[in-house]
Structures are given as structure tokens and as C-alpha cells.
């Protein structure tokens, strides 16, 4: 009975749609970043081989670090939005279902 009340709640439908859409947007962005890097490595590795300064560091090292850090940043963006928007909506859905 409570499952039906939750599933039939328009707020639940809104939650499912918005959370799924946002999750896919972040997933596509992360895949574009990652596979973009892989494609550069595969086809234009000379771009990443450019030396930075007089040392041994090349452009590829900071770009690789940025790819890794982007996963953390995108995760943080999702968590921030979940805490701000989704948690309040879930609380409202729970309150409606308890009635």
C-alpha cells in the first residue's frame, strides 16, 4: 500500500525524471572527458608530449590529473544537488506517503 502511494505520488515521478536526467548528463560529460583524453592519446599524442618548462613534465601529466579530478568534481556536483534538491523532495514524498 505504501509502495503504491509513493509510486503514484507526482513528486516521486518528478524525482525519478530529474535525478535520472541529471545523472545521465553528468555521465555523458565524464565519458566525453575520459574518451576525449583517450582519443588524444591515441591520435594526437604529440599534443600531450609538449614539455612544460625546462623539466621533464609534459602537457599530458596535468591533463591526466585534470581528467581524474574531473570525476571528483562531478561527483561533488551530484552530491551537492542531491543534498540541496533531492533530499527535500524525498522528505516530502515520505511525509505524503505516511499520511
Image (spheres, helix red, strand yellow):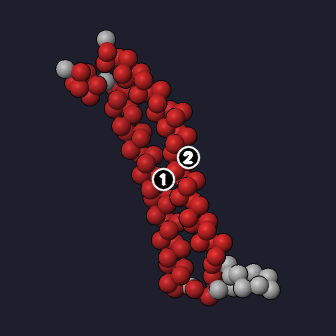
Q: How many marks?
A: 2
Q: Residue furthest left?
A: 1
**Residue 13 sits above or below residue 55 on the image:** above
Kindly identify which residue carries mark 1: 26
Say whether residue 87 is left or right of residue 99. right
Instruction: Give the numbered dot on residue 80.
Output: none
Residue at 67% x, 78% y: name it.
59
Q: Which residue is mark 2?
A: 77
Residue 98 found in image quarter: top left
Q: Residue at x 36, y 22 (%)?
A: 94
Q: Secondary structure at mark 1?
A: helix
Above or below, 85 relative to 64: above
Residue at left 28%, top 25%? 6
Q: Tell me which corner region of the image, top left, top right, bottom left or bottom right, holds residue 15.
A: top left
- Across and down, in percent, residue 10 comes to 34, 26
Is there CB contact under 8 Å for labels 1 and 2?
A: yes
Residue at left offset 31%, top offset 18%: 97
Residue 3 appearing in the image: yes
- In this rendering, is residue 83 above or below 25? above
Location of the N terminus (image quadrant): top left
For label 2, count other residues whose C-alpha is less than 10 Å away and answer few (under 14), some (14-19) or many (20+). few
Q: Earlier in the sequence, mark 1 or mark 2?
A: 1
For label 2, the SS is helix
Comparing labels 1 and 2, the label whose residue is closer to the camera: 2
Q: CA distance from mark 1 to mark 2?
A: 9 Å
Amino acid at each position: 500500500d505504501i509502495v503504491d502511494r509513493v509510486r503514484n505520488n507526482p513528486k516521486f515521478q518528478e524525482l525519478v525524471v530529474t535525478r535520472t536526467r541529471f545523472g545521465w548528463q553528468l555521465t555523458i560529460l565524464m565519458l566525453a572527458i575520459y574518451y576525449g583524453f583517450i582519443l588524444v592519446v591515441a591520435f594526437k599524442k604529440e599534443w600531450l608530449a609538449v614539455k612544460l618548462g625546462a623539466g621533464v613534465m609534459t602537457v599530458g601529466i596535468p591533463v591526466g590529473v585534470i581528467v581524474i579530478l574531473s570525476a571528483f568534481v562531478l561527483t561533488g556536483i551530484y552530491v551537492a544537488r542531491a543534498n540541496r534538491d533531492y533530499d527535500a523532495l524525498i522528505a516530502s514524498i515520505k511525509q505524503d506517503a505516511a499520511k
